[in-house]
Image (spheres, rainbow, N blue to C red):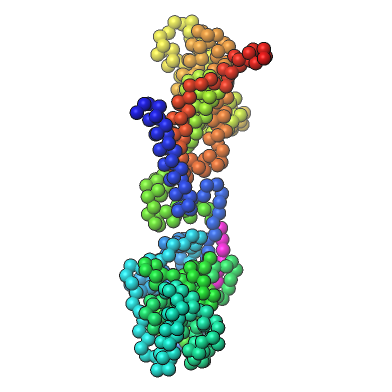
Amino acid sequence: MSARVQVYLLAFICISLGLGLTAYKKIELGFPLLPGEQRSVWTVEAKVVFNAEDKPVKVSLALPDSDPNDIVISQDFASPGYGFGWDSEGVQRRAEWARRNATGPQTLFYRLQLFHAPVRTPLEASTPPEVIDFSHLDESTRIAADSLVTHITERSADAKSFANELVRLLNNPQSNMDMSLLLNTENNSSMGQKVAIMMVVLNRAKIPARIARGLHLEDGRKRQTLTELIELYADPHWILLDPETGDTGTPDNFLLWQRGGVSLLDVEGGSNSRVTFSIIENSRPAKALAVALGEDTKAALVDFSIYSLPTEIQNTFKHILLIPIGALVVVLLRILVGIKTSGTFMPILIALALIQTTLFVGLAIFLTIVSVGLWIRSYLSHLNLLLVARISSVVIVVIIIMAIMSVLSNKLGLSQALTVTFFPMIILAWTIERMSILWEEDGPKEVLIQGGGSLLVAVMAYLAMTNTLVEHLTFNFPELLLVLLGIIMLIGQYTGYRLTELRRFQAMVKEH
């Protein structure tokens, strides 16, 4: 395999891998491609009220199950005079309040902040659930339910279609005598009783099902109660079913609070208890939520990434990851355009200094130091010093110039000139030395060409490296460095004319 083919193959692999990882972080982990994107964060407050009966009080409230699609940002409680704890040993996690003695109306609060993922994955069941035993039903109800099961089974193919047909009959009981009998038996056609009838029929049909309760997340809702849905087991997932419409799947912006028949609220030592919910929507940076989601799910691209480093190191990498952008600018302008620079990566170092000093202040400082340094360097050349001693002298002179500039600017109140310390002094000294040698060998014109070219490339690199979108992508999607690597490898194969060389053919164009 020739070297050219190997380069193309490696470039293709790097670009494909970089774009694939970037797409994965965007689609699966929710990382925003644009800076400043916001996501909705919901604050749900549960308010428990009851009348204490002048004796020890214990209150237990079921809390939302751990759902990989939801990120719990914070949770707290407010209950003056009550002790508080968590109970995670039962079927469902619960909040527990306790007090030795209480009398009269009592109010307890539980507040939850969470990020609700828009794309939801079905909840898997580790083992098939058991069918609930409804053998305690009276004879007429059991016969009607069994007859209804036979009727629906003939008109359905699986658990889902069975449930859909059952919902249709529930909403149109006149079309089936058995359904009319069940509704009359319950003597009520409220949604709660419809859910109860669905549970009876589904379990008589040996279809595992359970009641799921949750909240429709809407900003500004107050005193809400939980909405009841039916959850069917369809190996290996649970499917939510709306008993009113027959729609399957988790509704948009729906927070599942409780699954199964466990009680929502238990109060010992009190009466007339009830729980209501209030909901508020706020906005949070999308990137922070994506990182939290990745850490919560142990995603490899987050767990083994820059985000796992200390904050101070992350800030350092913010600048380091911009260097490849400067390298790409240098490659484009030198190989394709043909701009001459003093040193290959000198423009990148100047651009990094310009990021700290701002563009115009940095250019003024750079031109001042290099001009004064060239003048002093021309004097040192007459002393016939050896190379190492001459460069060391230039370094000391550069430091003296920087110190003088800092002191004078401080005395004159020019605080921006104090940023001169961000310029790498060794690089400045070496630049002065190279330009001085270039002046002696090729004349001042070549110094102006290479010096101007370096500043032009540095300014272009500075503009690219300080672009908000570029900063966002390089830090949050470091996988794109593979794409840059592939592009630079492809450009490295270019052997044609540079743009600045095309002027040689200008005379030929005029003749034609």
Q: Quadrant of residue 365?
A: top right
Q: Name the one closer to the observer, 152 or 456.
A: 152
- The residue under the point 50% across, 90% down is 177
Q: In which quarter of the image is the N terminus?
A: top left
106 relative to 428, above or below:
below
Is 366 contained in the magenta span?
no
- The residue under the point 39% across, 29% down is 5
316 relative to 272, above or below:
above
- Give residue 171's position: percent from left, percent from top: 55, 82
Q: Residue furthest bottom?
A: 139
In this rendering, position of residue 192 left or right of residue 502: left
Number of marks drawn: 0
8 relative to 21, above or below:
above
Q: Name the one closer to the observer, 138 or 155.
A: 155
Q: In which quarter of the image is the C terminus?
A: top right
Q: Can residue 464 be seen in this view?
A: yes
- The residue under the point 39% across, 72% down is 233
- Give residue 194's position: percent from left, percent from top: 50, 83
- Give residue 77's position: percent from left, percent from top: 46, 70
Q: Is residue 424 visible?
A: no
- Give residue 355's position: percent from left, percent from top: 54, 33
Q: Name the one closer to the observer, 254 or 4.
A: 4
Q: Name the one closer to the observer, 385 or 158.
A: 158
Q: Is the magenta stretch mostly helix, strand or loop?
A: strand
Q: Quadrant of residue 146?
A: bottom left
The region drawn magenta spans 278-283
174 relative to 413, above or below:
below
- The residue under the point 37% across, 50% down is 300
In this rendering, position of residue 172 left or right of residue 123: right
